[in-house]
């Protein structure tokens, strides 16, 4: 008899690709995922899984090289975000079926933040793509999503680990995948991904964005943190603090921790490596759970 799992997937940029590995390992070991709640990348991966399209999404992500990632960045420099996101979201539309959340095979919840009314928005019905688009709108990076009288940004601002939004069932196992853990990165030294893509490095992607940014924002040579590093560190600390408080209030049966040092926020070209990190962390967490029980 399969063991039913209520699964919670945290926000966390490219580290959220590890959610794919966690899901695959859970299923490999005979766990039956009966509901999902996710924020940001957790909402994207969880939503795609609920449509049954996770293998296709994994294949697409794994095919991305560094130049592919760079080409999807359409800079806008508006007052509400640096990346318009049309190219990225157009690619997402090819992978996320045009359907409503209530028609998915399992209960699903995606979390976003309404910056105008200063409240959490939980999508449990309505258009799936719109819910995911709202949930992954990283503040100051992606432009927010306008919906009715709401201005929606990344759900991680309020609820990066939406344990209180997952639908529970009798005798289920609560599993949380936290990709923002302040733990050492224990992965072995891995070779560079197979495609150099003209030698464009992840750091060069960020450097290119920073150079563009410098055209409109004067550079302070005394600054030790660049613009994107400052955003990353600030958001990382915020996610850690909120997640710590969440875990104090909600004790999962299985906590799968992924180091926040496993990769950069925008290292999507490392998908295969990140997925394996998710699998490894899941095996370790399940082993601990089994030993206790």
Image (cartoon, helix red, strand yellow):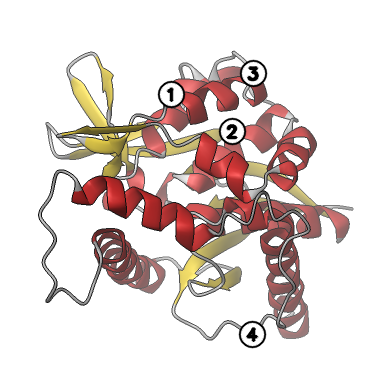
Disc 1 target residue: 86
For the residue pair 98 and 255, the one nearer the viewer reads as: 98
Disc 2 target residue: 107
- Tell which circle, 3 or 1, labels the residue nearer the N-terminal end: 1
Residue 38 lies, with reference to residue 3, above or below; the image says: above
Residue 54 lies, with reference to residue 188, above or below; the image says: above
Query: Which residue shows up at 37% across the image and 66% down it?
Result: 243
* Coordinates of residue 197 in the picture (x, y in percent): 67, 49
Judged from this view, the residue extending furthest toward the front is 198
* Coordinates of residue 49 in the picture (x, y in percent): 68, 37
The local secondary structure at tag 1 comes to helix
Give the Cα separation between the discs numbered 2 and 4: 34 Å
The local secondary structure at tag 2 comes to loop
Disc 4 target residue: 186
- Tell which circle, 3 or 4, labels the residue nearer the N-terminal end: 3
- Tell which circle, 3 or 2, labels the residue nearer the N-terminal end: 3
The local secondary structure at tag 4 comes to loop
Give the Cα separation between the discs numbered 3 and 1: 17 Å
Q: Mark 2, mark 1: which one is toward the viewer?
A: 1
Give the Cα separation between the discs numbered 3 and 2: 16 Å
Q: Is residue 41 left or right of residue 50?
A: left
Q: Is residue 146 visible?
A: yes
Residue 135 figure quarter: top left
Q: Tell me if mark 4 has few (under 14), some (14-19) or many (20+) residues whose alpha carbon lies within 10 angstroms of its own.
A: few
Give the Cα separation between the discs numbered 4 and 1: 36 Å
Q: Is residue 233 left or right of residue 281?
A: left
- Tell which circle, 2 or 1, labels the residue nearer the N-terminal end: 1
Disc 3 target residue: 97
Q: Tell me if mark 2 has few (under 14), some (14-19) or many (20+) residues whose alpha carbon lies within 10 angstroms of its own.
A: many
């Amino acid at each position: 008899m399969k063991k039913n799992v209520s699964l919670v997937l945290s926000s966390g940029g490219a580290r959220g690709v590890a959610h794919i590995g966690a899901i695959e390992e859970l299923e490999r070991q005979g766990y039956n995922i009966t509901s999902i709640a996710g924020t940001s990348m957790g909402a994207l991966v969880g939503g795609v899984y609920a449509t049954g399209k996770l293998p296709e999404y994994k294949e697409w992500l794994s095919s991305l090289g560094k130049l592919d990632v760079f080409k999807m960045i359409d800079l806008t420099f508006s007052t509400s975000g640096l990346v318009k996101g049309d190219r990225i979201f157009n690619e997402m539309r090819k992978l996320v079926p045009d359907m409503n959340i209530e028609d998915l095979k399992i209960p699903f919840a995606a979390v976003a933040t309404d910056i105008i009314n200063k409240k959490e928005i939980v999508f449990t019905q309505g258009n799936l793509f719109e819910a995911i688009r709202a949930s992954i709108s990283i503040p100051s990076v992606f432009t927010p999503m306008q919906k009715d009288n709401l201005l929606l940004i990344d759900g991680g601002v309020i609820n990066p680990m939406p344990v209180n939004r997952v639908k529970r069932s009798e005798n289920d196992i609560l599993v949380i995948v936290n990709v923002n853990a302040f733990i050492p990165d224990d992965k072995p030294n891995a070779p560079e991904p197979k495609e150099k893509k003209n030698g464009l490095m992840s750091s060069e992607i960020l450097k290119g964005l920073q150079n563009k940014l410098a055209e409109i924002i004067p550079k302070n040579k005394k600054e030790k943190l660049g613009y994107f590093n400052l955003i990353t560190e600030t958001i990382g600390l915020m996610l850690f603090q909120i997640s710590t408080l969440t875990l104090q209030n909600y004790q999962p049966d299985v906590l799968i921790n992924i180091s926040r040092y496993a990769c950069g926020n925008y290292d999507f070209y490392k998908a295969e490596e990140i997925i394996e990190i998710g699998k490894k962390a899941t095996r370790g967490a399940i082993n601990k759970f089994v030993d206790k029980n």
